[in-house]
Each structure stands twice: as structure tokens, then as C-alpha cells.
Image (cartoon, helix red, strand yellow):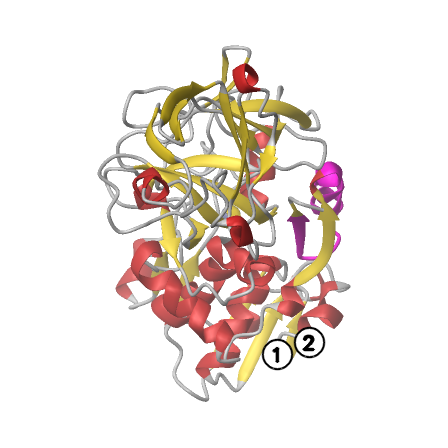
Amino acid sequence: MSKDGQGTSSAKAIVDFNGQRRRTKTIFRDLNPRWDKELEFLVHDDAESLAAETLEPDLYNDKKTIVEGGSDYSTAAAARGPEIISIDQFNLLHTAAAVAWEAGKPPVIEEVEVAPPQAMEVRVKILFTSLCHTDVYFWEAKGQTPLFPHIFGHEAGGIIESVGEGVTDLKPRDHVLPESNMCDLLRINTDCGVMLNDGKSRFSINGQPIYHFVGTSTFTEYTVTHVGCLAKINPSAPLDKVCVLSCGISTGLGATLNVAKPQKGSTVAIFGLVAFGLAVAEGARIAGASRIVGVDLNSKRFQEAKKFGVTEFVNPKEHDKPVQEVIGWGVAVLVGVPNKDDAFKTHPMNVLNEKTLTGTFFGNYKPRSDLPAVVEKYMNKELELEKFITHEVPFAEINKAFEYMLKGVGLRCIIRMNA
Ligand SMILES: [Zn+2]
């Protein structure tokens, strides 16, 4: 990891300097966070005392230039200047990641080695990530089998750095939202923590594997995911806003728009007025619900919920009878992550009376195909995301995001990787 927090990586390359073929010692790659200068290469060749050369796009005609095209070295080989004959597979990329060593203990920012993507895998530079309740839930490891050390994080926005063999629909510099894929092949296995291809983790510290989280792991400057865990989105969408769509907000939104499907003018009741619930309210607002009833045991949440279009409030503590007798019954949609031993029972008569209880994991969105359209809803101002983003911290202060979540302060805290 370089001092400014950017990732660097090294590889061996054979470079033709004016007809002389030599193997360079190292190629350091430096990814510019603003992406307005393309990629820069620093070529280091001890034998020739070439030292490090910063290669700017405007030096393309200079014989020292090796620049062109992300990590696609076939493009690089075609660049003007010295010809790259071949490049060995990337070595490990050294980067900063927040490693959770033990359940419930604050993650520590460590220098982590990130292996190159293998077949059907993609390495992504994470620019923004946010903390979701699911991270905290598995970090506390109260209800699940603990697996540590772990790199948590699954809500994020990033840019593809390199792709593995067989990846054809994504390429370096595509903008993506990582998403825990729900298809059968990749179905979330939180006890697993390794990649499908070889059953190993791509993260390590001095050879010790650090586990992946729900196929994503975004509390790191670079991550490796299966290609199926990434949704390619409009590159002009601001990643510091749309990153919240990669989990919680889309779940709440989809629970309303895709599962409950309220008609225009109908009534929607929401149990629990934190991020998920307020995303449900946003869905109800978009659907044109005329009454949006917020139910929460904490009356303080009612004020905030008004911003999300909630029109009425019910605190069950203030009623003698069960809340369903206060507000009535409709299609009930369950969201969230249950405890391992959670169960509920109901009298069969409730089903015979044509009541509907259903649930959804990701708002019934198919991440790869549907998320880009949700991003467009934000781009054309149909969907409001800013009101969900209540805090922002630099990566070095990621533990503040955990504190906010544990104290129930705010909704979403954006973690800026390059800040
Ligand atoms: Zn989540």
C-alpha cells in the first residue's frame, strides 16, 4: 500500500526498449482515483537505472511510454513507444483492507494481499462502500457460525481493475455495484468465505487467508468477486450515492415495488423505520400510496420518517390491542436476515382467510439485470437517495460507521476509500 492509500501492484514484464528486449524488474501500477489521467505506469528497471518513470498520456510519443488501456495488456502491447512483449500474470496486489479478526471486535485496517482474479472472476477497485446491518449482524456473530478473520462489506460502488479468464461481458474501467448474487451457483453461503473456482480466498496477510464475505467483501481498496456478483451500471452515476443501492435500499424498494405491489392510492404499513423500512416508504411513495403508516416502538423515529413520505405513525406500546387490530391486515412482506433458530407459528385459519405472508431477500430484483435500471431511476430523479445518506467517513475511520450503526444513529454512512 502506498502512503496515499492507493493500491500498487507488481508484475514481471518483457519490454522492448529500442530493439533491446529486457525483462523489467517490476512494473508498478498506480490507479488514479479520479480516473481523469487514465492509468499511469511507473517502470522500474534496476539494471538500466531507469528508475521510476511516470508515464502520462501526453507522453505517448515519448519512447518511454508503455501506457494504454487499463489492465488489458494486449492493448498495452499495441501502444506506441517501447513494446511490451509479454507480461507475467499479476502478482499480489498490496492494498488496505479492514480486517475483522474476531467477532464483535472493531476491524483493523491492515495491508492485505489481493490475488489476481481467476477464471470468471473480477478484481474491483472499491471507491465507496457503506455499512449495512447484515455486516454488523455477521460481525457480531451472535446468530451464525463465526468465520474469522473476515473482510466484511457488501454495499459498494467501484471500478473494474482487471478481469479473469472467460469474463467477456465486463472489462477494466466498467463501473459496477457488487451484489451478493442469489442465483443457485453463487447462493450466499456465509459459512464459506472462499471463491468458487479453487475453494480459496483471494485475500491474505503473510500467507494467512482472510475470508470473503457473501461473495463481495468491500471494506477493502480492492476486492475479487465472481463475475456474477457485479452489476454493470451507468458510468455517469455518482458512485458515492448509488453504492447504497447494492443492498439495503434496493431490498426495501423492491419489497414494495416488486413484491407487495401497492396500487396507486392504497395504504402501506411499515414495521420498523430504519434504513430498510424507509426504503420501503420510498417505494410506497414512488408507487403512489396515499397512506403510509409507520410502525415503530421508538417514537423518535417518526419525525425522520416524515421526510420519506410516512403519513401516519403507530407505536404499538401506546395501544392495548395487537397492532394488526389497530391497522388491519394486507399482504405482509418479510425482509431482513433472521437468526439461525428463528421460527414463527400461525393458525392455519390465517392462511385459509386468504391472508398473504411472503418474503424477499433482495426485493425480488435480479441484481445483474435489474440494478442498472434502479440506478437509472435515481438518475432521472424518480428515486431519492441523498436522504438515506446521513453520514460520511474516510476509510481510516470505518469504525465510526460501526459505532453509528450500533447506536442506531442515522441511516447510511458512506465510507470513502480514497479520503
Ligand atoms: Zn446489506
Residue on which the image places disc 1? 309
What type of secondary structure mainly makes up the magenta span?
helix
User: Which amino acid is tagged 1?
Assistant: Gly
**How far from the left and from the top, in percent, is residue 337?**
47, 44
**Residue 400 within the magenta-colored segment of the rendering:** yes
| Residue 37 appears in view | yes
Asked whether the residues under the numbered discs 2 and 1 touch, taking CB atoms below 8 Å apart as contact, a structural biologist would say yes
**Viewer-proximal residue among 344 and 236:** 236
In the picture shown, does residue 112 fall above or below 408? above
Q: SS for tag 1?
A: loop
Residue 28 lies, with reference to residue 296, above or below; the image says above
For the point 55% across and 57% down, the residue is 244
Q: Is residue 339 left or right of residue 401?
A: left
Q: Residues within 10 Å of mark 1 (few under 14, many from 20)?
A: many
- What range of the chain is rendered magenta? 396-415
Q: State the residue position of label 2.
A: 306
Disc 2 marks a residue whose amino acid type is Lys
- Position of residue 238 relative to residue 398, above or below, is below
On residue 239, the disc is: none
Label 2: state its secondary structure. helix
> Does residue 268 appear left or right of residue 227 in this picture?
right
Q: Residues within 10 Å of mark 2 (few under 14, many from 20)?
A: some
Q: Is mark 2 within 8 Å of ligand 1?
A: no
